[in-house]
Image (tube, grey):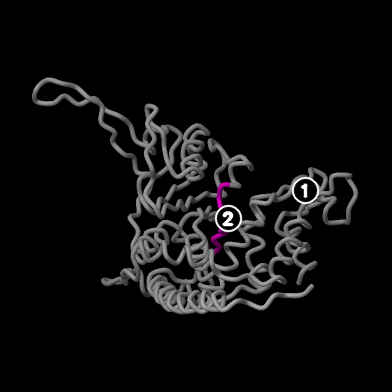
Amino acid sequence: MSVMSPSPSGSADEAAIAEKAEKAVARVTEAKADIAQVIFGQEAVVEQSLVTILAGGHGLLVGVPGLAKTKLVETLGTVLGLNARRIQFTPDLMPSDILGAEVMEQSADGSRAFRFIPGPIFSQLLMADEINRASPRTQSALLQAMQEYHVTVAGQPHDLPRPFHVLATQNPLEQEGTYPLPEAQLDRFLMQIDVHYPDLEAERRILLETTGAEQATAQVAMDAVELAGYQQLVRQMPVGGSVIEAILKLVRAARPLENGEGDDITKLIAWGPGPRASQALMLTVRARALVDGRLAPSIDDVLALAEPILQHRMALTFAARADGHTVRNVIARVKEKIA
């Protein structure tokens, strides 16, 4: 297939994007360094969280207690110059506790009127702590706002601030009395970010630097307006044809065939990721390149983001789970097809 040579105006546009990207790389690198002063031993988690925000999406942090998930969100809010708030989800939490409510007020002349009091969702970075402990009704209210970027109270719409991001946490332990998010609602999250235990050296540093009289504090590296510009830049970054083909091949290989046939991998899959997963990869591979100091994504970015993008968007058959297969192992086998 022949490729048309770029026009002079196209070359100028590409040069402008490259110049903006170089400035963005410097600023994002500075932000990463500031975060590293506070969060130790979670480099992959920090990178994936930054990628999620730069791509304009929401993230689901999954990990046991005590791994600095809350601290990470607080630090991201400070470093990125975002207005951050936190909600501790509990079974008795109501939608109005998140969205806000209208209250009746009486003025000095005796007249009465309703006034809307915004809830904590009216922030730029919201931490939804242990989201699976709230009722499905409350979860649905949050997830709808995440998708539509506005809330409706008493028939009146109220726009959420932009940028707006939710980083929700979910504890994989103590599932009794919880309301796990349905798979269809999990798709609202751009990425599922698994938070693992730190290695030995990172934990040693945590002991030495967080239990003394003085502790490092996060510094502001940018503001919300600047971040919004970088999010727009991510959408303008070029993506090579080989990367696009790798995304398509990866996502389509993670789906079962409709006729029931297929190879050893597709027969293990009950349902797989839809086009939203492809869209998520197109955005996140660009954002990851920017976070890593590159001006264009590569197939390595696709492979690195396959698990956090796909694992909450697919499920295995009962027979596959009974045989000991896991979603992560299946994704690893799918990745081998494009490696």
The tag earlier along the polypeptide, 1 or 2, is 2
Q: Please tell me which residue lies in front, 162 or 18.
A: 18
Identify the residue under disc 2. 192
Identify the residue under disc 1. 321
In the rendered image, residue 84, in percent from the top left (x then y), is placed at 35, 54
Q: Farthest residue to the front: give it.
A: 8
Say which mark, if any, is on residue 61. Answer: none
Residue in the picture at 53% in, 49% down: 171
**Which amino acid, mark 1?**
Arg
Q: Please tell me which residue lies in front, 194 or 235.
A: 235
Is residue 193 shown in magenta? yes
**Element at label 1:** helix
Residue in the picture at 9% in, 25% down: 108
In the rendered image, residue 334, in percent from the top left (x then y), is placed at 77, 62
- Other residues around mark 2 within 10 Å, as few (<14) / some (14–19) / many (≥20): many
Q: Is residue 307 left or right of residue 134?
A: right
In the rendered image, residue 233, in percent from the top left (x then y), is placed at 49, 67
- Quadrant that contains the C terminus: bottom right
Q: Is residue 172 above or below residue 211?
A: above
Is residue 238 shown in magenta? no
* Mark nearer the viewer, 1 or 2: 2
**Magenta region's main secondary structure?**
loop
**Which amino acid, mark 2?**
Gln
Q: Is residue 72 left or right of residue 280?
A: left
Q: CA–CA distance between discs 1 and 2?
A: 20 Å
Magenta span covers which residues? 188-197
